[in-house]
Image (cartoon, rainbow, N blue to C red):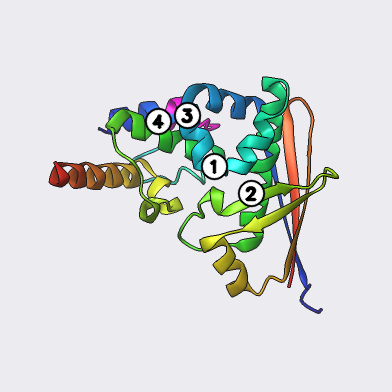
């Protein structure tokens, strides 16, 4: 999953640094991610993982690192499985 | 020094990147960020580039508003901040739901906005009065 998240970040986050130079915990906003990029990342994640970010997950902390994004996607995928 | 009764927020947006997002994500992008009224006004403009400039200016205004509202952990839903255009061409900010609640909590009495754009960039300044 990390590879998919990193690929999405490469394409959508428009970071001034290569995302591969950041570890999973490093802060993406500190690395230059903008609000507009956050929207693009969120929509690309929704497409890739077939999930929808509810209002309660619309927090900067959710999109602030590869690890926090992975945790949110895992949570959303688990919720989807429960519904199914 | 006295605390200012005003707070200023500013933002700048790359118009081409907004256009790219619209092309890539379509209605998902538009519906996440803009109210129906905002979309209707911008889409009434004649050219795709002009539409992107109009939407980019509104996104900048929403982000400038968020800067004066200073939300803590949660991100505000961009649609709870509406840029309303009057017939004379000037614009006001209308807040809904969480954004309106936050403005009240912060003690904001009024918000004023000014937006501008060139081909490549759109910008907005918001002044909050306490």
Q: Which residue is mark 4?
A: A44
Between marks 1 and 3, how big is the CA–CA gap?
17 Å
| Helix, strand or loop under label 3 | helix
Q: Which residue is mark 1?
A: B33
Few, some or many residues within 10 Å of mark 1 (<14, 14–19, 20+): many
Q: Residue at x 55, y 49 (%)?
A: B79
Horizontal and vertical percent for residue A35? 55, 43
Between marks 2 and 1, how big is the CA–CA gap?
9 Å
Q: Residue at x 31, y 44 (%)?
A: A67
Few, some or many residues within 10 Å of mark 4 (<14, 14–19, 20+): some
Residue situated in front as seen by the camera: A69 or B46: B46
State if disc 1 and disc 2 touch (CB < 8 Å).
yes
Q: Which residue is mark 3?
A: A12
Q: Which residues are magenta?
A: A10-20
- Residue A49's disc number: none
| Helix, strand or loop under label 1 | helix
User: Is B85 situated left or right of A5 in this image?
Assistant: right
N-term-proximal mark, 2 vs 1: 1
Task: Residue B44: tell me if it is visible.
Answer: yes
Q: Which residue is mark 2?
A: B62
User: Is B18 situated left or right of A37 in this image?
Assistant: right
Horizontal and vertical percent for residue B98? 51, 62
Task: Residue B13: tell me if it is visible.
Answer: no
Horizontal and vertical percent for residue A60? 45, 51
Between marks 4 and 3, how big is the CA–CA gap?
8 Å
| Helix, strand or loop under label 2 | helix
Residue B78 magenta-drawn? no
Q: Nearer the viewer, mark 1 or mark 3?
A: 1
In the image, residue B110 sits, relative to residue B114, either above or below, namely below
Few, some or many residues within 10 Å of mark 2 (<14, 14–19, 20+): many
């Amino acid at each position: 999953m990390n590879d998919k998240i990193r690929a999405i970040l490469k394409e959508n986050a428009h970071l001034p640094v290569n995302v591969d130079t950041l570890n999973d915990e490093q802060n993406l906003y500190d690395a230059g991610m903008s609000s507009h990029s956050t929207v693009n990342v969120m929509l690309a994640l929704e497409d890739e993982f077939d999930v929808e970010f509810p209002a309660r997950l619309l927090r900067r902390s959710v999109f602030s690192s590869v690890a926090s994004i992975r945790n949110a996607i895992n949570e959303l995928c688990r919720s989807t499985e429960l519904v199914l | 020094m006295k605390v200012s009764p005003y707070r200023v927020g500013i933002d700048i947006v790359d118009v081409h990147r907004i256009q790219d997002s619209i092309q890539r994500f379509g209605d998902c992008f538009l519906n996440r960020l803009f109210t129906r009224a905002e979309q209707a006004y911008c889409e009434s403009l004649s050219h795709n580039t002009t539409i992107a400039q109009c939407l980019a200016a509104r996104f900048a205004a929403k982000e400038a508003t968020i800067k004066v509202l200073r939300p803590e952990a949660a991100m505000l839903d961009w649609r709870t901040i509406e840029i309303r255009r009057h017939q004379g061409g000037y614009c006001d900010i209308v807040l809904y739901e969480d954004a309106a609640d936050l403005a009240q909590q912060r003690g904001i009495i009024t918000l004023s906005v000014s937006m501008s754009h060139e081909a490549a960039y759109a910008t907005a300044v918001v002044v909050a009065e306490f």
